[in-house]
Image: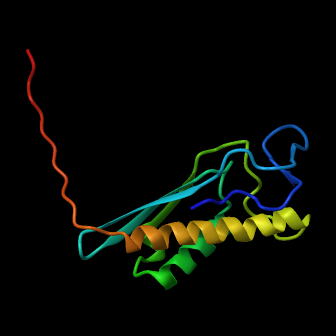
Amino acid sequence: VDVSPQEFPINMPGGFGPNMAESSNDPLHSRAFVLSDGDTTIALVLVDNLGVAQAVVDEAKLLASRKTPILPEHILISATHTHSAPASNVIDGPAPAVSYRKRLLGGIVDSIVQAHSNLRPAGIASASHALP
């Protein structure tokens, strides 16, 4: 799911001073992978961001668990640690930054919901062979 900012200018944190973006060049994504054995379902999520604040993670897990049968404690959310993404948890401040938190949160939840809706039967195997 594309989680690129839509409102500008917006700060890209992680440096030693403001780093204001005036537009988006390459998309930022939230990617989710859902696995289920029929009893337990888990979601692994990777977000293009410097990091995802705990408040955003907790809220995303709760919202995703309301839209899928995945328990919040069975959802793992991590970040790529890019310095080319806005802060994840601005709740009071510049309008573009506040708006981005909502977009990021919605994108994380949507990626989990979409991955869950795309569950298909699959198998996994492994093998090894001694090579002299």
Position of residue 124 in the picture relative to residue 87 (left or right): left
> Is 44 drawn above or below residue 23 in the view shown?
below
Quadrant of residue 105 within the rendered picture = bottom right
Q: Position of residue 57 (x, y in %)?
A: 60, 66
Q: Residue at x 73, y 49 (%)?
A: 85
Q: Nearer the viewer, residue 53 or 8?
A: 8
Colour convention: rainbow
Q: Residue at x 74, y 66 (%)?
A: 101
Q: Nearer the viewer, residue 39 or 35?
A: 35
Looking at the rendered structure, the number of numbered marks drawn on it comes to 0
> Is 49 drawn above or below residue 107 in the view shown?
above
The residue at the far bottom in this view is 66
Q: Position of residue 65 (x, y in %)?
A: 48, 80
Q: Residue at x 82, y 38 (%)?
A: 15
Image quadrant occupied by the N terminus: bottom right
Q: Position of residue 27 (x, y in %)?
A: 65, 50
> Is 15 drawn above or below residue 6 in the view shown?
above
Q: Position of residue 119 (x, y in %)?
A: 32, 69
Position of residue 18 in the picture relative to residue 14 (left or right): right
Q: Residue at x 68, y 61 (%)?
A: 53
